[in-house]
């Protein structure tokens, strides 16, 4: 059989060249599939990961305590600054508000921890020293995260949360509550455990421009021990 002139002298691929080209193509496909698999896994991890907001919550509390507002509120029992703290709840007057909530005016800020939900709830209302009933109602109000609620609480997931209070420079003991009406503590200690994290502790000064912040891992054992 005689081939056309344009095919004369043309050489095809050898079997070794075909096998080598196939092997290289297969290797490239394997590398691409592995890279794609890693990329998809990383994307899925970012979708499932919930950002840790406990540090932002601690920073907000630090700023609000540093700008504690000692303006007396005219309660029936007498006018006095408002500061009321428990081991897992805190409410006080402050000049530092979340602008997105109250527009940057002085407020009554409230923190409340729900151990069952492992969540800290935060809310604030404008400070009116001549309307003590609104303050009392706010502190007693139940938690609602409904955007249409009159008082909306914002939730931050925290595995554990605990507050204690120091009453003076010479005091070496911390109390798990503060109910003195005519005074406010010199510092507040916040202990918490973020999701998938270790226990941490921070101490914040109250009504002072100088921070006494101490951030460290707890060395006293599990949360709740002294």
Image (tube, helix red, strand yellow):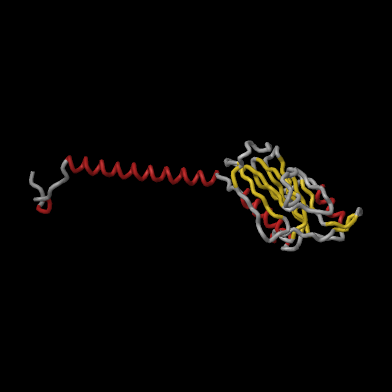
Q: Could you tell me if residue 147 is visible in this image?
A: no
Left or right: residue 35 compared with residue 59: left
Residue lying farthest to the left in this orientation: 2
Q: Give the vertical position of 84 relative to 103 (above or below).
A: above
Q: Nearer the viewer, residue 156 or 29?
A: 156
Quadrant the N terminus occupies: top left
Residue lying farthest to the front in this orientation: 170
Q: Give the vertical position of 116 relative to 187 (above or below).
A: above
Q: Quadrant of residue 132?
A: bottom right
Residue displayed at 66% across by 50% down: 203
Total numbered circles: 0
**How far from the left and from the top, in percent, is residue 109?**
75, 54
Residue displayed at 81% across by 49% down: 139
**How far from the left and from the top, in percent, is residue 113?**
72, 43
**How far from the left and from the top, in percent, is residue 137?**
84, 50
**How far from the left and from the top, in percent, is residue 185?**
76, 52
Q: Could you tell me if residue 19 is visible in this image?
A: yes
Q: Give the vertical position of 169 relative to 20 (above or below).
A: below
Residue displayed at 71% across by 47% down: 121
Residue displayed at 21% across by 40% down: 19
Quadrant the C terminus occupies: top right
Q: Nearer the viewer, residue 22 or 203?
A: 203
Q: Nearer the viewer, residue 50 or 178?
A: 178
């Amino acid at each position: 059989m005689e081939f056309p002139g344009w095919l004369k002298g043309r050489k095809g691929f050898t079997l070794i060249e075909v096998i080598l080209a196939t092997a290289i193509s297969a290797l490239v496909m394997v590398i691409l599939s592995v890279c794609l698999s890693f990329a998809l896994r990383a994307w899925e991890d970012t979708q499932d990961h919930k950002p840790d907001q406990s540090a932002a919550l601690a920073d907000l509390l630090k700023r609000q305590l540093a700008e504690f507002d000692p303006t007396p509120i005219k309660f029936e029992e007498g006018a006095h600054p408002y500061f009321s703290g428990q081991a897992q709840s805190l409410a006080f007057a402050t000049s530092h508000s979340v602008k997105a909530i109250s527009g940057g005016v002085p407020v009554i800020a409230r923190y409340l921890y729900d151990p069952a939900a492992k969540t800290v709830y935060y809310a604030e209302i404008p400070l009116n020293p001549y309307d003590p009933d609104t303050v009392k109602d706010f502190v007693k109000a139940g938690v609602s995260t409904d955007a249409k609620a009159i008082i909306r609480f914002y939730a931050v997931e925290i595995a554990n949360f605990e507050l204690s209070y120091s009453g003076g420079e010479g005091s070496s003991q911390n109390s798990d509550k503060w109910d003195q009406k005519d005074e406010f503590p010199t510092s507040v200690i916040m202990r918490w455990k973020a999701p998938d994290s270790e226990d941490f502790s921070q101490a914040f000064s109250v009504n002072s421009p100088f921070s006494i912040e101490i951030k460290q891992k707890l060395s006293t054992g599990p949360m709740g021990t002294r």
